[in-house]
Image (cartoon, helix red, strand yellow):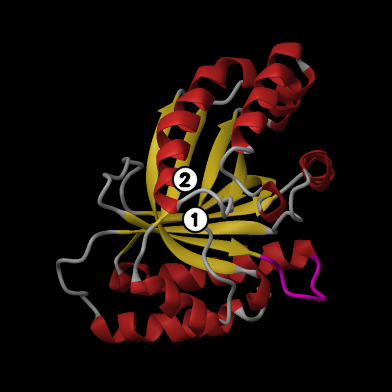
């Protein structure tokens, strides 16, 4: 499958509470209603949580401020996605959704890009998380002067196993890297909508709620500094973001 990531910025004239309410309770059902026409298989909104952890992660890395959240939409294949864009019912549905997004999203400061998921580890056996589970959402821009291919390779082959080595001590339950694909399509979508430039990918780490102490507190304490230092090898921190979110699954027809 492929996944479209939509890094969402709020229109400043829309109050934050109204933004989240409209996104979840009006736009979400609208996407679900159009799912057959656009051939979408799954749709999840991840809303940013107000927590001190956001500033701690941002300041440690010198990152941009958090966004209000992200949208993720899955398709069976890139061919299915392209077919939806080329089919009159799909085109009409996409146009309706775009018009609705203009009501609450600052399009010029938002980003859309297609990705392929890389599962690094999953200690849940594929089970779905409850609403209490939080997710570290890391919007990634590759290091200046580094090719996208080298960024993705370092991220997957080096950084992924490093994160996995700290996972159980740090209470991580699942870790997925989503690497940006289809740059020509991303550029066409961005130009057509007036979006900001697409990113190079997104990391998502689901963290179980606090409770039991770490089985290895010394390893857990070392994890943050070690991982941040490794990220600097392939991430342009000043153009990336890291913040906590909570998922809202609108539909899953896989």
* Stretch in magenta: 141-147
Q: How many marks?
A: 2
Residue 83 percent location from the top left of the image: 74, 21
The picture places residue 112, in percent across and down from the top left corner, at 68, 46
Element on which disc 1 rests: loop
Q: Residue furthest left?
A: 212
With respect to residue 209, does 108 lie above or below? Answer: above
Q: Earlier in the sequence, mark 1 or mark 2?
A: 2
Report the predominant secondary structure element of the magenta stretch.
Answer: loop
User: What residue did someone put label 2 on?
Assistant: 19
Residue 250, visible in the rendered structure: yes
Q: Mark 1 near mark 2, Cβ–Cβ under 8 Å?
A: yes
Residue 1 visible in this rendered orientation of the protein: no
Position of 163 with respect to 61 (left or right) is left
Mark 2 Cα shell of 10 Å, populated few (<14), some (14-19), many (≥20): some
Q: Which mark is residue 126?
A: none
In percent of the image, x 75 and y 67: which residue is there? 150
Residue 2 is a magenta residue: no
The one nearer the camera, 157 or 39, is 39
Q: What is the number of the mark on residue 68?
A: 1
């Amino acid at each position: 499958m492929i996944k479209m990531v939509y890094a969402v910025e709020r229109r400043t004239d829309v109050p934050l509470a109204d933004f989240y309410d409209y996104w979840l309770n009006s736009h979400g059902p609208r996407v679900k209603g159009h799912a057959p026409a656009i051939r979408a298989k799954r749709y999840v909104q991840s809303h940013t949580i107000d927590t001190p952890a956001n500033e701690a992660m941002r300041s440690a890395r010198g990152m941009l401020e958090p966004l209000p959240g992200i949208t993720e939409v899955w398709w069976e294949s890139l061919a299915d996605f392209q077919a939806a864009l080329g089919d009159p019912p799909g085109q009409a549905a996409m146009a309706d959704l775009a018009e609705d997004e203009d009501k609450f999203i600052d399009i010029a400061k938002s980003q859309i890009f297609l990705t392929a998921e890389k599962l690094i580890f999953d200690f849940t056996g594929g089970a779905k998380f409850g609403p209490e589970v939080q997710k570290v959402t890391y919007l990634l821009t590759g290091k200046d002067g580094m090719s996208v291919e080298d960024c993705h390779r370092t991220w997957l082959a080096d950084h992924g196993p490093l994160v996995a080595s700290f996972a159980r001590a740090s209470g991580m339950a699942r870790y997925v890297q989503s690497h940006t694909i289809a740059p020509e399509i991303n550029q066409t979508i961005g130009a057509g909508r007036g979006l900001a430039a697409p990113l190079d990918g997104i990391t998502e780490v689901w963290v179980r709620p606090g409770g039991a102490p770490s089985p290895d507190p010394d390893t857990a304490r070392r994890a943050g500094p070690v991982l941040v230092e490794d990220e600097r090898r392939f991430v342009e921190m000043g153009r990336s973001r890291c913040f906590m979110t909570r998922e809202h699954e609108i539909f899953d027809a896989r």
